[in-house]
Image: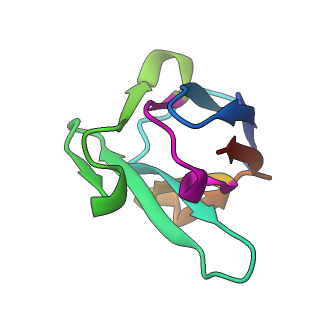
Amino acid sequence: QVQLVESGGGLVQAGGSLRLSCTASGNSFSFNVMGWYRQAPGKQREQVAIITTGGSTKYVDSVKGRFTISRDNAKNTMYLQMSSLKPEDTAFYYCNVQLWMHGWDIWGQGTQVTVSS
């Protein structure tokens, strides 16, 4: 089955930027939905942004105007460009992909993003 590998997390000061990447191993797939989720300590996992095969996007209100999700189907890779980061963006970020024809709903191992004030 496909495995997801995330990268790009780290420590950044408030107002800074980071770009997360999520690459799926194996053959090239046109995943129906690709998305980023995050979980902060003591909080439930929340959907941050998703992007469909057609390029439609959806963002949680708290990141609108600051984060941009994109995908490169040829590279089986999804990105999350995060700008104007805030301490409340601190969380473990996970990528997720869905391929409905195979019933796939796959999660990456996550990457830590820490924003200092």
- Residue 60 seen in render: no
Place of residue 95 in the rendered image (x, y in percent of width and height, measured from the top left): 60, 50
Quadrant in the rendering for residue 115: top right
Taking the spot 43% from the left edge, 44% from the top edge, the residue there is 31
Quadrant in the rendering for residue 84: top left
Place of residue 11 in the rendered image (x, y in percent of width and height, measured from the top left): 76, 35
- Residue 69 seen in render: yes
Taking the spot 56% from the left edge, 53% from the top edge, the residue there is 89
The image quadrant where one finds the C terminus is: top right
Q: Is residue 47 left or right of residue 28?
A: left
Type of colouring:
rainbow
Place of residue 62 in the rendered image (x, y in percent of width and height, measured from the top left): 34, 59
Place of residue 90 in the rendered image (x, y in percent of width and height, measured from the top left): 65, 54
Determine if the magenta segment contains residue 88.
yes
Please tell me whether residue 5 is drawn above or below residue 33 in the rendered image: above
Residue bounds of the magenta highlight: 78-92
Taking the spot 50% from the left edge, 29% from the top edge, the residue there is 79
Closer to the camera in the image, 51 or 105? 51
Mark count:
0
Please tell me whether residue 72 is drawn above or below residue 79 in the rendered image: above
Closer to the camera in the image, 86 or 23? 86
Taking the spot 64% from the left edge, 81% from the top edge, the residue there is 43
Determine if the magenta segment contains residue 33.
no
* In the image, farthest residue toward the top: 74
Quadrant in the rendering for residue 9: top right
Q: Is residue 77 left or right of residue 111?
A: left
Closer to the camera in the image, 16 or 103? 16
